[in-house]
Amino acid sequence: MSVLSINDLRLSFKGLRGKTDVLHGIDLSIAKGERVALVGESGSGKSVTARIVLGLLQELRNARISGDVLFEGQALAAMTAKSRADLRGTDMSMIFQDPTSALNPTFTIGRQFAEVLRRRDKTLSAETCATRAADALAETEIPDPARVLASYPFQLSGGMNQRVMIAMALANRPKLLLADEPGTALDVSVQAQTLKLMHRLVADHATAVLFISHNLGVVREFADRVYVIYRGRIVEDGPTAAIFAHPRHAYTRALLDAVPRITGAGLPDVPEVSDAFLAPHISHGSGS
Amino acid sequence: MIRTILVLTRNPLSLLGLILVGLVIVAAVFAPWLAPYPTHNGAVVDFLNNNRAPSAQNWMGTDLVGRDIFSRILYAYQISLTLGVVVLVIATPIGTIIGLLAGYVGGWVEAVLMRVVDVFLSIPPLVLAIAMMGVLEPTLTNAMLAVTAMWWPWYARLVYAIARSEREEGYVLAAEVIGAGTPHIAFREILPNCLPAIITKMTLDMGFVIIIASSLSFLGLGVQPPTPDLGSMVAEGARYLPDSWWLTVFPGLAILIAVFGFNLLGDGLREVLEIDG
Amino acid sequence: MDPPHSLFFFRTEPPMSPILRLLLRRLGISVIVLIGVSMLIFVIARIIPGDPARIALGPNANAEQIANLRAEMHLDDSLPVQYANFVVDVLRGDLGTSLYTNRPVTLDIAQFLPATLELVLLAGIIMVGVGLPLGILAARHRNRWPDHLVRILSLLTVSAPSFVWAVILMLLFAFYLPLFPVAGRISDVYEIERVTGFLTIDALLMADLAVFADALHHLILPAVALSLSGIGQAARLTRANMAETYEKPYIEMAQAFGFFPNRIARIWAFKPSLIPSLTIIGLDFAAMLGNAFLVEAVFAWPGLSRYGVNVILRKDLNAIMGTVLIIALTFLIVNIIVDLLIALLNPRIRHSTRGGEA
């Protein structure tokens, strides 16, 4: 059974000037422990997909969502808002683009970590939280966990905050980790280091990952399989190696051509709209 | 301008504000024609009809010397609005010029001007106005003077904050590069960017000026009888609570309605013009 | 941007008491402002009205009386000398003699200030205790009915001067529903030993709960009337700043980690929003010192404001200057407390080595 299975997911926003369609029927699945990348430009619908999986967009009044999202075989749409919320921070968690702004500036790391740990077990004492948080931070190769726990995010470097985010996201042993452009805001070499670390940790814990990125270079290092998304539609999917070796969809080829030479830097410079980009979905199969 | 008003009418609260403000302005401007007893504006005495509860003849009752309260409220709006307009028309340019100078020129000009502003802002506004009225004769002109004296620093601070952040903007630097003079940059380049915030603040402040002015006359430090004033009407009536409730309740509500209207309008403007704070 | 080697580098060193540095700087600024305030008060009192002696004595005084009083008040000296004398007197704690009570102004103020402060303090507590939760509620349910309701209520409360609220509350809850006393600080039957001048505290010092309850009972209605517009301001401000905070990535992070919406509102979104709100809340609190004039008049509250109005109506210049100076001083103290509170709440200031703007 896959950890996550998305079938014909559609999303539109109702606004003052009528309806805006964002997703036009997304199909995607992630097996246990599998690392899957969803690649596309900004505005292609990759971030909203992650937010639907988390159940966050369902809370918005003007969002119209249809199709199935199954988490461990359970349909999110059939669940109450409360039970969707119960999954967040426990069985699913998320890593954000800019670690420093994703941490609350007015509370210590320790305080925020404790709140995260108590998502799993409300009864945890402050001391237990501190011990477990320190263990989780040690796992991310942070040298002085106690000092980090007593610090505020602005006292730490971006790379350090990124490690903190990774430790928090994995602390409750989620089955699915959503990573939305992780580390894009960081220095290239720091980003590479933290991605390697994240790769090792999710492999150790057999955590499934939905890795969202605009950067094919980064995806190549990290993902087992890739989905390419263009304007709310999946245009091509397949094992990472196959996509990179034999890109078949015009948009994928355009994206690959635009990969910046140095990993991680800048947004890919994809040409303007081309009719070929609207060609139907091509699948390389699961590859396993 | 017209588009802004059209957008405002789409929000029910802003529309209500627009209607209330419109009604208050109409009441003030056309008071001589709208008032059932136009002569009750002044020192008229009608002891046969004094202190009457609201009735068909006197919708809001009569005061202690028999004057129609509704008529007096209409005339009192004239005083309140005149005072508000005069104060803002004088205080806003003074505050704006000082704020622009301090914010754009910087250096010792900024230091001196803003310390002066700090001094004014470190006395609660009402206390400063009360203190000034304490030494001045209580007349309408002096009340305007006192409220203006405490009002300009708020505009200076507002414009100063905007001017200081605009100072570093590209268009200002561009104007400096092509050799534009200080007055040109301050008034032609920076000032237009402060206008939405100034206009919004003026709308909200109309309400606050009315509050402060009525507070002064409530304490007997503002407009003097027999000129009708909402604050002094409340003060006179307060001694006859609870029996002659209409003496205080109607003038009190009149203040509330006018200020509420300006606040709703200002709040709507702030949203439409996207001003923070 | 971090240099690559900064992975394990802590950006700041442990603080060297930035709070103390901030306090000293604020005190320094306050002294400058206070000098400015004393000049402003001096200018208002000495230059605008013409001859203070003539004003003090009234229109029926003869030339000799005026000349005597002028000599007594040192009015024949040059203005800078007069100002210097004024400052020296103030620094010695001498605010002159009140022409109204014939007592030193400092004694009068010491007698009347506690009643006003007690009223303003309770009103401030009510403002914060009701206004902030209302703002949190509105922000938590942004653009839904609780938000609209709070917006209308707070716009209403700020739309009338405190004396109108005082009159309305008195009519409703002292006359129609006689729940609270109409006037005064304490019932005549009680004797109270004045230690602090705060009757509630003095009652507690006497360990007499009946007196405490009576004093509090008298205090509630005027304090609520005084706090109403502050409640509206605090609620609006909190809501506005929190709505901005809700757009921040760290709130989305909290939501993505399943933190409970009520806890997000009360803790994670509230604290970052409170810091920028505090300055204005401090100003609103200070504005209550002015509005107390209005509420005290309605409830016959024997405080500084009633004294202030009386001395103003009698053109008692020493007392006017003293009263305004004391209020400005109280205002400055409140501002310093607010700044320290902000520094305590904001780790960026607390942990900055410069101890200043963060």
Image (tube, grey):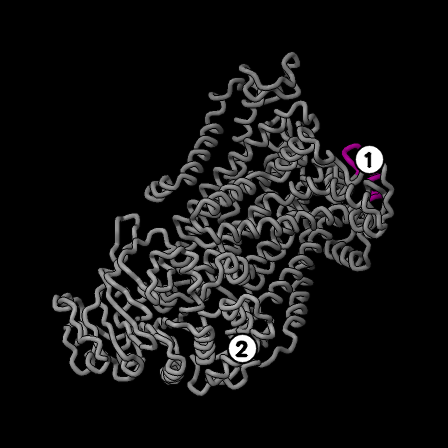
Identity, as a three-letter code, of the amino acid under mark 2 = Arg
Name the foreground residue: A111 vs C57.
A111
Subunit under mark 1: C
Given this view, does label 1 or label 2 mark the residue nearer the observer? 2
Whether residue B220 is visible, yes or no, is yes
Q: Position of residue A282 (x, y in %)?
A: 16, 71
Mark 1, residue position: C62
Q: Residue at x 27, y 56 (%)?
A: A66
Subunit under mark 2: A
Mark 1–mark 2 Cα distance, whole angstroms, equals 87 Å
**C316 to the left or right of C222:** right
Residue A155 colored in magenta in the image: no
Label 1 SS: loop
Identity, as a three-letter code, of the amino acid under mark 1 = Asn
Residue C64 colored in magenta in the image: yes
Residue C119 against residue A45 in the figure, above or below: above
Name the foreground residue: C44 vs B88.
B88
Quadrant including the N terminus of chain A? bottom left
Q: Position of residue C106 (x, y in %)?
A: 81, 51
Mark 2, residue position: A132
Magenta residues, start to end: C57-75
